DNA sequence: CTCCCGATAT
DNA sequence: ATATCAGGAG
């Protein structure tokens, strides 16, 4: 049993009590809406995405709607999320592929999802885990990357290698909720700039905690 | 590796 | 002013 494996076991036991309501914070009603919302979430807060998708999902409901809306109109709606030209282009292209290859439905495999325009492994795992309830991988975003390193669950910065390490350390049944635990903790306590180690619920499990706490006192 | 890019907290 | 926010493509 490695140190990382021991930490993973303790985290699996304690995090559900700390974050019993951990869940996807993007607003969606269908797999397609979650797919679109997740594309929009790149380098943007969920809060901002939810403001934009409220209007967007009122304007577009089906894959056909997303494929047929003009580039200009879509850019206008999603502008405040940043990267708006790429995001608008990707959403329209992605919707066209859904119509051409999948009858307007969202596919249910990692390979098919990740092959869609603007959809990588991270977005594919979000849709599989949350919209379809399939624990096929672990979502590795900016928060999971930061927390996994601070908690000593991996030494890698590459998302695929981090995901492999997490899949070895945690049972498949918690893969989806694991990302929610880490993301919730990353947003509320273990934030990037100024982590709140003094009030951290899992400080005793964190190999980086003492270092970060000392740095905070010095500053 | 760079580029895409607005909103927000520090 | 600058780092950061549920990344992905070239």
Image: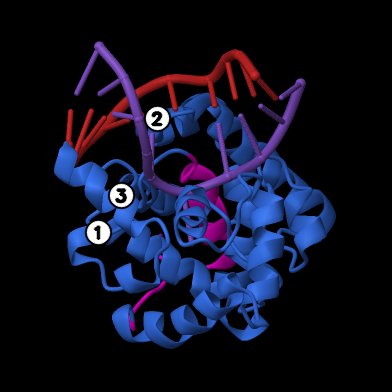
Chain colours: A blue, B red, C purple
Disc 1 and disc 2: Cα gap in Å?
Answer: 35 Å
Camera-side residue of A17 and B4:
A17
Q: Which residue is tagged 2?
A: A79
Q: In the rendered structure, find residue A212 and report the number of the disc placed on it.
A: 3
Q: Is residue A104 above or below residue A175?
A: above
The structure residue drawn at horizontal position 40% and vertical position 28%, both measured from the top left corner, is A76
Circles 3 and 1 on the same chain: yes
Quadrant housing residue A204? bottom left
Q: Where is residue A171 in the image (x, y as percent from the top left)?
A: 64, 83
The structure residue drawn at horizontal position 76% and vertical position 62%, both measured from the top left corner, is A110
**Label 2 crowd bin: few (<14), some (14–19), many (20+), radius 10 Å:** some
Location of the N terminus of chain A (image quadrant): bottom right
Q: Which residue is tagged 1?
A: A197
Contact between marks 3 and 1 (CB within 8 A): the answer is: yes
The secondary element bearing badge 3 is classed as helix
> Is residue A197 located in the magenta-colored stretch of the structure?
no
Q: Position of residue A215 (x, y in %)?
A: 25, 42
Disc 2 and disc 3: Cα gap in Å?
Answer: 36 Å
Chain letter belonging to callout 3: A
Q: In this view, does A166 lie above or below B8?
A: below
Judged by depth in the image, the label closer to the viewer, 2 or 3, is: 3
Quadrant housing residue A193? top left
The structure residue drawn at horizontal position 39% and vertical position 36%, both measured from the top left corner, is A81
**Label 3 crowd bin: few (<14), some (14–19), many (20+), radius 10 Å:** some
The secondary element bearing badge 1 is classed as helix
Question: Could one spot residue A210 in this view of the protein?
Answer: yes
What range of the chain is rendered magenta? A20-42
Q: Earlier in the sequence, mark 2 or mark 3?
A: 2
Circles 2 and 3 on the same chain: yes
Disc 3 and disc 1: Cα gap in Å?
Answer: 7 Å
Q: Where is residue A30 in the image (x, y as percent from the top left)?
A: 53, 68
Circles 1 and 2 on the same chain: yes
């Amino acid at each position: 049993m490695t140190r990382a494996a021991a930490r993973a076991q303790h985290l699996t036991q304690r995090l559900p009590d700390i974050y019993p309501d951990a869940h996807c914070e993007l607003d969606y009603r269908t797999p397609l809406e979650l797919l679109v919302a997740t594309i929009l979430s790149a380098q943007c807060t969920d809060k901002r995405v939810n403001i934009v998708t409220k209007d967007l999902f009122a304007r577009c409901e089906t894959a056909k709607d997303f494929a047929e809306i003009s580039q200009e109109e879509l850019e206008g709606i999603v502008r405040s999320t940043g990267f708006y030209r790429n995001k608008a282009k990707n959403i329209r292209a992605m919707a066209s592929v859904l119509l051409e290859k999948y009858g307007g439905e969202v596919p249910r495999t990692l390979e098919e999802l990740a092959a869609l325009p603007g959809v990588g492994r991270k977005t594919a795992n979000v849709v599989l885990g949350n919209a379809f309830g399939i624990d096929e991988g672990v979502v590795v975003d900016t928060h999971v990357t930061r927390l996994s390193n601070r908690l000593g669950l991996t030494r890698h910065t590459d998302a695929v290698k981090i995901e492999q390490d997490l899949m070895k350390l945690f049972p498949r049944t918690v893969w989806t909720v694991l990302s929610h635990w880490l993301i919730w903790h990353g947003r509320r306590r273990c934030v990037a700039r100024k982590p709140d180690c003094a009030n951290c619920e899992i400080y005793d499990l964190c190999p980086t905690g003492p270092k970060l706490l000392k740095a905070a006192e010095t500053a």
